[in-house]
Amino acid sequence: MTRKALVCTAASAALLLSVAPAVAVADDGPSADELADQAKDNLLKTDSVHLKLTDRGTDAKNSRTQPTSMDLALDRDGNCVGTMRMGSGGGTLDLVKRGEEVWMKPDTAFWKSQVPGSQGEAVAELFKNRYIHGSTTDSLLKGLSGTCDLTAFQKELYSGGSTSDTHLTKGTETKIDGTKVTPLKGTRDGERTVLYVTSAAPHRLVEATQKGGGTDMTLTFTDYGEPVPSATPAPDDTVDIGKLQQELGTA
């Protein structure tokens, strides 16, 4: 239960955005270079975003600790709300973080994959359909809460922004969820990358895909600058982290 999932997602986004833009060609709009640069810049500068990851790649599908899907609204203050689904039957996890408080609600499959043997079954039953509530100072929640760190995501995206010898070219304008986007296409090491950037300013990355060589990933970014939902689980639906620590301590 660490921030690894977010770091991996940022690294993937950095890889997608690091494909070198093509030499500018005169047309009726911004060049591939300009679109790619502005899309990355807007993602680095936003105070909040709604991120979705779908990873159908071999590594994710075979891992119980790597998400095959992630749906998170997060901001630079460390607030977030969302869901993660792990590969290889590793279950799902609902996550809410507000300030220093953290709530997580794993399903039965998640508990069984994380806590071995009969103890996993017991913990799953005891905390069924309930949130574990604690703070970022709790060792069991500290790493997980790092998933909500948009600033860390942006730092990883920035540091992974080196270019390569593969070039992006502009495709024909299309629409995603009613928004006009321009696809920027490139191929490297047999992996095909497409970045869908809003045709109108401000130019933002809406969707990025990468396929080939065992990789099959889609990232979407929406709600730039929109507040993260502030609702938190009701007290009747939560259990203090101390109860879980007691259960794990009886192993």
Image (cartoon, helix red, strand yellow):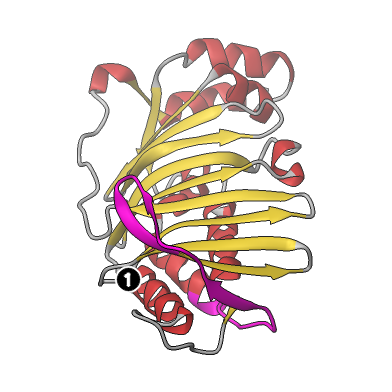
Q: Residue 187: tell me if it is visible.
A: yes
- The residue at 47%/83% (across/down) is 33
Q: Quadrant of residue 35?
A: bottom left
Query: Per the image, is 230 magenta?
Result: no
Examine the rendered structure and indicate whether residue 217 appears above or below residue 164. Answer: above
Residue 196 location in percent, x, y? 45, 61
Q: Quadrant of residue 12?
A: bottom right
Q: Residue 78: tell me if it is visible.
A: no
Which portion, as a residue range, is magenta? 158-182
Task: Name the residue nearer the viewer: 77 or 58.
Answer: 58
Q: Quadrant of residue 168?
A: bottom right
Examine the rendered structure and indicate whether residue 59 appears above or below residue 24. Answer: above
- The residue at 78%/63% (across/down) is 190
Examine the rendered structure and indicate whether residue 230 appears above or below residue 92. Answer: below
Label tally = 1
Which image quarter holds the N terminus?
top right
Q: Amino acid at mark 1?
A: His
Query: Per the image, is 174 magenta?
Result: yes
Examine the rendered structure and indicate whether residue 238 appears above or below residue 221. Answer: above
Which image quarter holds the C terminus?
top right
Residue wearing tag 1: 203
Residue 65 location in percent, x, y? 66, 40
Provide the secondary structure element on which disc 1 rests.
Answer: loop
Residue 162 location in percent, x, y? 60, 82
Residue 100 location in percent, x, y? 31, 49
Decide if residue 26 is on the left or right side of residue 179: right
Task: Name the residue nearer the viewer: 178 or 50.
Answer: 178
- The residue at 65%/43% (across/down) is 66
- Mark 1: few/some/many CA within 10 Å (<14, 14-19, 20+): many
- The residue at 68%/26% (across/down) is 113
